[in-house]
Image (cartoon, rainbow, N blue to C red):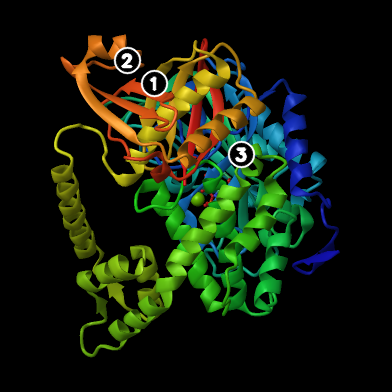
Amino acid sequence: MFTFGSIPCRIAINMTPNQLKEKYIKFFLERGHKEILSSSLVPENDPSTLFISAGMHPLVPFLLGEAHPAGKRLVSVQKCLRTEDIDRVGNNYYHTFFEMLGNWSLGDYFKKEMILWSYEFLTKELEIDPNKLNVTVFAGDENSPKDEESAEIWQKVGIPNERIFNLGKEDNWWGPVGKTGPCGPDTEMYIDTGKERCGKDCKPGCHCGKYIEFWNDVFMQYNKKEDGSLEPLEHTNVDTGMGVDRTSAILEGHMDDYKTENFLPIIHKIESLTGNKYGEDEEITRCIRIIADHIRSAVFVLSEGVIPSNKDRGYILRRLIRRVVRFGKKLSIDKDFTSDIAKEVIQIYEKDYPEISQNKEIILSELQKEEHKFSSTLDRGAKEFEKIATKEAQGKIVTAEEAFNLYQSFGFPIEITEELASEIGFSVDTDGFEKLLKTHQEKSREGLENKFVGGLSDHSEISTKYHTATHLLQSSLRKVLGEHVSQKGSNITGERLRFDFSHPEKVTDEQLKEVEKLVNSWINSNFPIEQEVMTLEAAKKLGSLAFFGEKYGDQVKVYTIKNPKTNEVVSKEVCGGPHVKNTSEIGEIKIIKEEGVGEGVRRIKAIVS
Ligand code: ATP
Ligand code: MG
């Protein structure tokens, strides 16, 4: 039992997050939907964002009209990461990583079916008390009509008018993705937690925690035209999203995501490592939540082959881990702790997410490495920051130079400096910092370009390792799978290699292990890499592999890796480079993913560490 305002009520259902996921999928399967698997957090073929942030995100092409191979009714559990919510993490219901349940109609059912199903699922399947449900619908504005239809359907199913709220575009409108295209109103479902209202304007949409949004039904019914006007769409879509953590917390009645099974073991671990008690003190509880949330996110991001760096995804990962280390210090943890907590996360999620169980060792070792790197400078950096904070009559500003020094010498991501500054009422000259950073990056890039004149590719140390690792991978695949394997494409970033090759069927786990083992044995044998320049003709005569997707000049470079003792050639390839001088420089390779990308073409992603 728990109390809801003054009325005692039964906890709706004691359902674990996994049971909720099963129930949701089953409910929509029974209504003609096909289940699709979660896409990876790292978007495929979408350079516009770093991480997937909603279930609909990987489905955009289909919402825009492309036919989905699984049909018109889809359901999924999607991994999501929202860095824009990072400052809200610390309360009971905001996370950076979370799982989103969702179902879609691609030109099939619309508002009536969806709202009826939403109500049925919530009140019958989840047994949520209908009196605690509040909904919002689009209020309408000068450009777009009010969503009367949704409001009427909610009334018909039994939500009284005083619990149907009209909100504007910021809350209840979706799209279009670009300037033009499909868009429309949405209707959001909130639970009334029973808390006091924070003020007289407090209503669903307010972030004080009285009303928690946990499901959203989006109705794409208009096409926005070049001139800004809306025309009705011929094929309307439905897109919904329900947060697993929030809904589980509601079902268990305590309204605290961190008390659900997906978090509890993590919280217990943090308690035992720090000697603190969750829930006793507001600030300590906030720190515990931030650590729990960020380590969960870091585990998922690492499981996809991203490693900490100063760029893009790697930088976000670095920020998450460094923030954890900082909050660990706040709780006076004086030993390595991130990997111990990560082990709990792994245990909770490895069954559902094989990428986590497959990459366990890397996840733990990368966390530890990053933790070490930052803990060794954090204390000194904090002292440096104190000096800045105590300087007199400077207008309470951390200057661009000071912020850059904290970044450069002590590894403080700018966001951490901003956070520290705001805790003592200082601001940071972030614009100036960005300028300094840019100048610094340009300088180091010039330095690199001078070192490797010619060649268009990225010549950083890490990508050089990946180039050589790719050659070894191709040779190993040809040894293990057969000589039919030939390169169909390759893409290298500072975070991973991706190699596409011809092969008619899935590469089994055993084969992948063998391929990986062979590459690592070559790496460990310290083979030198030799480079010669010759005509393409001559290179081919020597049996060098050459990739037909590439255009070669008159003279080509041939890179040979061979065993100097036996003269056995491990790899001979025409390539523009760059390459390491000795295989031992590569480190260790780990295959993190194998998948099909077309008829007879497979793709492998691997990382080196
Ligand atoms: P909010 O207003 O609370 O930020 P939202 O409008 O951004 O939510 P949607 O984009 O509609 O949320 O996402 C659908 C569902 O995903 C939400 O109803 C909620 O259950 C869940 N969700 C969204 N953001 C988060 C988050 N940061 N942490 C946990 N769950 C979230
Ligand atoms: Mg939001």
Task: In the rendered view, tell whether residue 374 sits above or below residue 484.
Answer: below
Q: Which residue is mark 2?
A: 549
Q: Mark 3 is on which residue type?
A: Glu
User: Mark 1 belongs to which amino acid?
Assistant: Gly
Amino acid type assigned to the residue bearing label 2 in the image: Gly
Residue sitting nearer the eye, 545 or 195? 545
The residue that appears at 36% across and 66% down in the rendered structure is: 411
Q: Residue at x 58, y 63 (%)?
A: 338
Could you tell me which residue is drawn at 41 percent across and 17 percent down?
488
Which quadrant holds residue 74? top right
Tell me if label 2 and label 1 are in contact, CB under 8 Å.
yes
Specify the quadrant that holds the N terminus. Answer: bottom right
- At a point 60% along the width and 14% down the height, the residue shown is 505
Relative depth, front residue between 593 and 5: 593
431 to the left or right of 140? left
Q: Earlier in the sequence, mark 2 or mark 1?
A: 1
Coordinates of residue 607 in the picture (x, y in percent): 47, 40
**Which mark sits nearer the N-terminus, 3 or 2?**
3
Mark 3 Cα within 10 Å, few/some/many (few <14, many 20+)?
some
Q: Is residue 267 visible?
A: yes
The disc at residue 355 is 3
What percent of the width, then of the height, locates residue 138? 50, 41
Q: Residue under circle 1?
A: 489
